[in-house]
Amino acid sequence: MAVFTPVSLDDLTQWLPQFPVGKPLGIKGISSGIENSNFFIYTESGEYVLTIFEQLGFEQLPFYLHLMRHLAERDVLVPAPVANHKGEILHALHGKPACIVTKLEGTSQMAPRPVHCAAVGGMLARMHLAAQDFAIRQPNLRGIDWWRTTTPVVLPYLPEDARQLLHAEMLKQESFAASDTYKSLPSGPIHADLFRNNVMFDGERLTGFFDFYFAGCDTWLFDVAVTVNDWCIDLDSGELDIVRTRAMLDAYHAVRPFNAAEKTSWQPMLRAGALRFWLSRLYDFHLPREAEMLTPHDPGHFERILRRRIDNQIPELY
């Protein structure tokens, strides 16, 4: 995750005594991602992750931080927010919202096999069920309302064939979202950004999901679609890998069975997942913000995925 707000060891030395983590020994910026400023921090008691929020405000952040705490208390593998001596988990650093969370062990699995996809599918279903009774409700801030406002902003940057695709898909998604079938889909808090680099593994053992800062309340199936569109594809072509897709869907279904409305909605939801990230990558690519270590992702990747989900057969949910 990019560094927009630098933090030095001296800054940390002044700020960290409010936490029960000991003296700071080192700090290192994390270069992947494009939303917040993130750092590994090394203290006398261990390693943690510091996040400074560049887009989200103090009023929005309790949803994300308390959701992570809620899930951790229910044995879902996620980072746990670290409270200060007053019991607070949301703080300020350099005038911006900030938090510290525990650091997950392992590394991201960037070349997943079916065994990894199955582990992610099962844990994702557990996460959805565990969050059902989470008291705070906040919409998916990158849902269809955001798509509506972002589409006219990015359209002028696109060639004609991509403009036609974006316009047609928005019409499709507007119709889908207005349908009775869509309105009947199970929903609740979702991760909404569960890409390969937001999950940790130690070998074949899943050690946790992290980076919940796109989370919100939406359909569970959208979360599954976003996850499949990253974990279960050939990265060059965007084509679904049938074996990996089947492994993830079967593992999810074994924990939280899909229903008939979800089965009907599967293809349009895969398209919705592709559209959401095509739009955000178009925005970040053509209207970038300045940051240290920032490298915008290629928007063409999700355009290819969207075209494949429109044109090609997809594995059924169950």
Image (cartoon, rainbow, N blue to C red):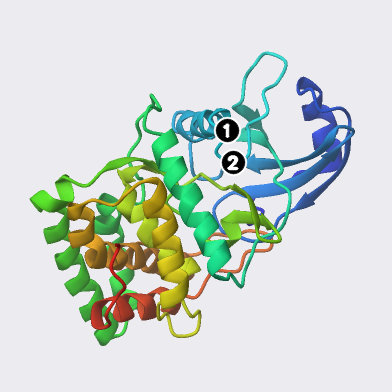
| Dot label at residue 72 | 1
On the picture, is 20 further left or further right than 56? right
Query: Which residue position is annotated with label 2?
Result: 78
Q: Residue at x 10, y 53 (%)?
A: 179
Residue 303: % across, % down: 36, 77
Viewer-side residue, 316 vs 282: 316
Toward which corner of the image does residue 51 lie, by quadrant? Answer: top right
Crowding around mark 1 (Cα neighbors within 10 Å: few <14, some 14 to 19, many 20+) is some
| Mark number displayed over residue 231 | none
Q: Vertically, is 1 above or below 13?
A: below
The answer, for residue 283, to whether it is visible in the render is no
**Mark pair 1, 2: CA separation:** 6 Å
Give the residue displayed 50% in from the left and 48% down from the top.
123
Q: Quadrant of the C terminus?
A: bottom left
Disc 1 marks a residue whose amino acid type is Ala
**In the rendered structure, which amino acid carries the disc numbered 2?**
Val
Give yes or no for contact between labels 1 and 2 (Cβ–Cβ under 8 Å). Answer: yes
Q: Is residue 127 left or right of residue 173?
A: right
Residue 130 location, x and y as percent?
A: 44, 34
